[in-house]
Image (cartoon, helix red, strand yellow):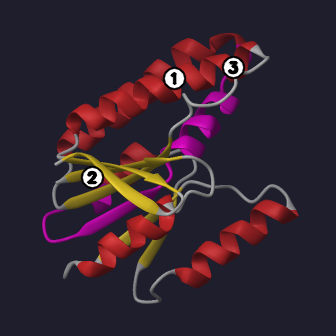
Amino acid sequence: MIELILGGARSGKSRHATQRAAAGALPVTLIATAEGFDAEMRTRIARHRAERDPSWKTVEAPHDLPQQLIVHARAGQCVIVDCLTLWLSNRLLASAPEHGDAAGEAAAAELLAALKRCGGRVILVSNEVGLGLVPDTALGRAFRDAQGRLNQAAAAMAQRVVFIAAGLPLVLKG
């Protein structure tokens, strides 16, 4: 089963995902996609780690998310991916800026193909980026467009889709 949890920044997406995983009886692996390039981001990462169940396995996958999903998302397991937004951003930033659209499409296609091979329960966390301002750079617009397309494709695959606003879940599908 695939579940997609969408919402804005600081909306409670990660908390909701961890609560959903904890409520189940399956062993949990959290695949983290953030990279701690500065002190503020390292503090955020530390806060997320401290909030997690210590019995959960954590896998750092800022770039190789599709491969890690194939390894860890198996029958009898629960995998949380936190989050698709940072992973896609990492992938776009690793490519040449002029390849933003193509890089986003290629990354999304690779991820969606991996999701089709997954077993068990997969909980995807992603930012809904379509509610904000239009970015003022070509790379920013390419990212926003790629993220929107990825969210739509993941929502189509998912059996359950939840939108989080102010910590409150709104079930959109399932």
Label 1 sits on a secondary structure element that is helix
> Which of the two marks, 1 or 3, is nearer to us in this view?
3
Question: Along the line of sight, which residue is nearer the eye, 56 or 16?
Answer: 16
Q: CA distance from mark 2 to mark 1?
A: 20 Å
Classify the position of the N terminus by image quarter.
bottom left
Task: Residue 89: name its quadrant.
Answer: top right
- For mark 3, what is the residue? 134
Question: Which residues fall within the magenta stretch?
Answer: 71-97
Residue 146, numbered label: 1
Residue type highlighted by circle 3: Val
Query: In which quarter of the view is residue 97 placed?
Result: top right
Element under label 3? loop
Who comes first in sequence, dot 1 or dot 3?
3
What is the secondary structure assignment of the residue under circle 2?
strand
Real-space Cα distance between discs 3 and 2?
28 Å
Determine whether, in the image, residue 126 is placed left or right of residue 131.
left
User: For residue 3, which numbered disc appears in the image?
Assistant: 2
Point out the tag, 3 or 2, that comes first from the N-terminus: 2
**Amino acid found under the numbered disc labelled 1:** Ala
Asked if one can make out residue 148 in the rendered structure from this viewpoint, the answer is yes
Name the residue: 21% across, 61% down: 121
Q: Decide: is 112 above or below 174.
A: above
